[in-house]
């Protein structure tokens, strides 16, 4: 292994959700569900997913920025939630899990709005 590989081998790697405990994953899922409900209730599903997918390569930088702005974000949102969201952005699969939560909430919302006769079983 060369010196450069030793120095920069993990330069662009970020952790995944496999490194979280089941309790941390459950807490993060609850946070993503609340975010998804807020997005779907405002009928912003498509713009939110488009925005998240477009900026997925920059999620680690956004997570670092969220950590830095944490004290200011705690004025608006719960400090614990802001920290959990920043941690999830820093992970490679955080954005993808949030997008899946939004899509799931959108499907469930569409089913509840549909006529009882039109619901799929």
Image (cartoon, helix red, strand yellow):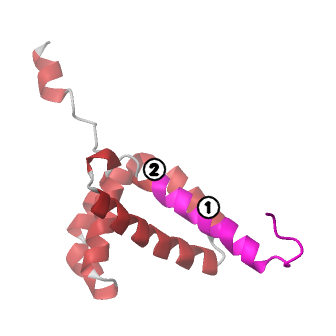
Q: Which residue is mark 2?
A: 56
* 51 with respect to 92 (left or right): right
Badge 2: few (under 14), some or many (20 or more) residues near its Cα, within 10 Å? some
Q: Residue 26, percent across and down?
A: 36, 64
Q: Using the rendered view, name the quadrant where residue 111 is placed.
A: bottom right
Mark pair 1, 2: CA separation: 16 Å
Of residues 100 and 5, the one nearer the viewer is 100
Is residue 77 depicted above or below 1 in this figure?
below
Q: Is residue 50 magenta?
A: no
Q: Position of residue 81 (x, y in %)?
A: 31, 75
Q: Residue at x 34, y 68 (%)?
A: 27
Left or right: 109 with respect to 39? right
Q: Residue 40 in the image: x percent, y percent?
A: 62, 74
Task: Tell me the number on the disc at residue 21.
Answer: none
What residue is shown at x 29% (from left), y 67% (from top)? 84
The one nearer the camera, 59 or 24, is: 24
The region drawn magenta spans 96-121
Mark 1 or mark 2: whose residue is earlier in sequence: 2
Q: Is residue 47 visible?
A: no
Q: Residue furthest bottom?
A: 75
SS under mark 1: helix
Quarter containing the C terminus: bottom right
Q: Is residue 103 magenta?
A: yes
Determine which residue is flagged by label 1. Answer: 103
């Amino acid at each position: 292994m060369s010196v450069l590989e030793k120095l920069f081998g993990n330069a662009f790697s970020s952790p995944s959700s496999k490194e979280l405990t089941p309790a941390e994953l459950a807490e993060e899922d609850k946070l993503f569900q609340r975010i998804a409900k807020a997005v779907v209730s405002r009928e912003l599903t498509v713009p939110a997913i488009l925005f998240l997918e477009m900026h997925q390569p920059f999620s680690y930088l956004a997570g670092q920025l969220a950590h830095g702005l944490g004290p200011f974000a705690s004025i608006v949102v719960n400090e614990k939630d802001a920290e959990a969201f920043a941690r999830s952005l820093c992970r490679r699969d955080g954005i993808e899990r949030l997008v899946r939560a939004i899509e799931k909430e959108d499907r469930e919302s569409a089913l509840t709005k549909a006529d009882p006769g039109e619901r799929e079983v």
